[in-house]
Amino acid sequence: MMSRERQVLIVAILASFVAFLDGSIVTVALPAISGELGGGLALQQWVVDGYLLSLGALILVAGSLSDTFGRVRVLRIGLVCFGITSLACAVAPWGSALVVARVLQGMAAALLVPSSLALITSNFSGPAQARAIGTWTGWTGIAGIMGPVLGGVLVDTLSWRLIFGLNVIPIAVTLYLLVGLHEPVRTRPAAPLDGWGAGLAAFGLGGAVFALIEQGRLGWSSPIVFVPFIVGLLAFAGFLWWEARAPHPMMPLDLFRIRNFGVGNLATVGVYAALSLGFFVFTLYLQQVGGFSATAAGFAGIPATVMLLLLATLFGTLAGRYGPRMFMAVGPVVAGLGFLLLRGAVPPIDLWVQVVPAIVMIGLGLAITVAPLTSAVLGSIPAEQAGIGSAVNNAVARVAGLIAVALAGTIIGSALDVGGFQRVMVVVAGLMIAGGIVSWLGIRTPAALAAPEHAE
């Protein structure tokens, strides 16, 4: 019979896996989607950012729901909604319908990620928690990078629409496992939802992202661009003002006063902005400039997937033993150097010489970074705030990726070419290395680990 700890870990991995997989699997299908539905680069950005927008805006509310109503209940609702919206994406008849379905899918995904990670942090402790988080981050990281592999095969052999229908299988398995998983009855009254905070966050992110994507087509002088941008900035400022005063904030700003939590989230901005922008442009570049098939472009990321699969749990365990600081400092620098190596991928591209070594280096850097980063952030806060803490960190990661992808057109220019690709890789490397520097300067090793065996 499966132990509760093992069941919790499998449920947490599967629930997050579909959310992260769906965030990345679509990337390799973007040329096929715009080829069938039209829309060019703007539609490609919206298909990615529509999902990230609602996920980033609502994941904080979902974290509060997880802490208040229970991780299992919120996970179950999220999985059902995610399955329904995935099918809506699969049958979308035109571009705008697909974007709407992706926004709704992101809302469902917001219920999955913080609840699954909070399920781990509330059922594991000490070194076992670090190992479990390492396993979780390894598999969710793999989902983020193996998505293009699976998506490429489906696009080339069947249809891009099947990348969304595929979600039904892991969702069904996870719902089955949840049947036998129970948690203690909630003993505290439900906290009121922070409706004002959620609304201001959605308007702030939505306005800014809309402007950043559409300015490439309409220009900053267009009122259709600059008005939403200004409204978005004002709404986001209002969000921060409100969260500092709200009786039940969905993003408690006091958490950021905890050193490792605040610094870890700052490092998260650099790492996940780089990761989202880097793989978004890399996958498009291999197809639209390099001339590779969707399958070949997807398989180009396999070395990074292998590195994560083999090493993420190891580095999660090492971070639990020695503290996360060194790993969070070294890992992003290694990944940043890998992205710089990709600048040499100039047509005619030799995958084995110009791409694979760089992707291996990126995968190694991510394996060193991701689990220690998650442990540093969530290990610094009280267990009863695990849900909201996980939600905040995931929101920071998704919003960082959201803004980075929205800026892709600004960095690339009017069309993706070799020069635009190389500029993006430099920006991505800079973001990664900045995340490493921030970690080295700001992260502190917990006292219990800093002096483990003295004076017995």
Image (cartoon, rainbow, N blue to C red):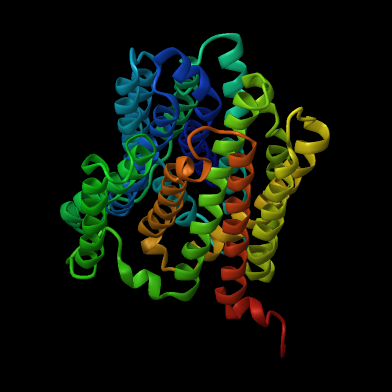
Direction from residue 28 to residue 337 in the image, left or right: right
Residue at (61, 78) in percent of width and height? 448
Q: Nearer the viewer, residue 442 or 232?
A: 232
- Evaluate whether residue 128 shows in this view: no
Compared with 49, 273 (above or below) is: below
Q: Quadrant of residue 48?
A: top left
Q: In the displayed orientation, state which residue is furthest to the right.
A: 353
Direction from residue 80 to residue 11 in the image, left or right: right
Direction from residue 456 to residue 406 in the image, left or right: left
Quadrant holding the N terminus:
top right
Compared with 123, 415 (above or below) is: above
Residue at (51, 45) in percent of width and height? 411
Residue 47 at what x, y percent from top left?
A: 40, 30
Q: Nearer the viewer, residue 166 or 98?
A: 98
Q: Quadrant of residue 381?
A: bottom left
Quadrant holding the C terminus:
bottom right
Compared with 402, 334 (above or below) is: below
Residue 387 at what x, y percent from top left?
A: 38, 55
Q: Nearer the viewer, residue 373 or 157?
A: 157
For the image, the number of numbered tags is 0
Q: In the displayed orientation, state which residue is furthest to the front.
A: 221
Residue at (32, 33) in percent of width and height? 103
Direction from residue 281 to residue 59 in the image, left or right: left
Q: In the displayed orientation, state which residue is furthest to the top.
A: 158
Residue at (71, 90) in percent of width and height? 455
Residue 118 at what x, y percent from top left?
A: 43, 52
Q: Quadrant of residue 75?
A: top left
Residue 426 at what x, y percent from top left?
A: 63, 52
Q: Nearer the viewer, residue 133 or 454?
A: 133
- Evaluate whether residue 141 shows in this view: yes
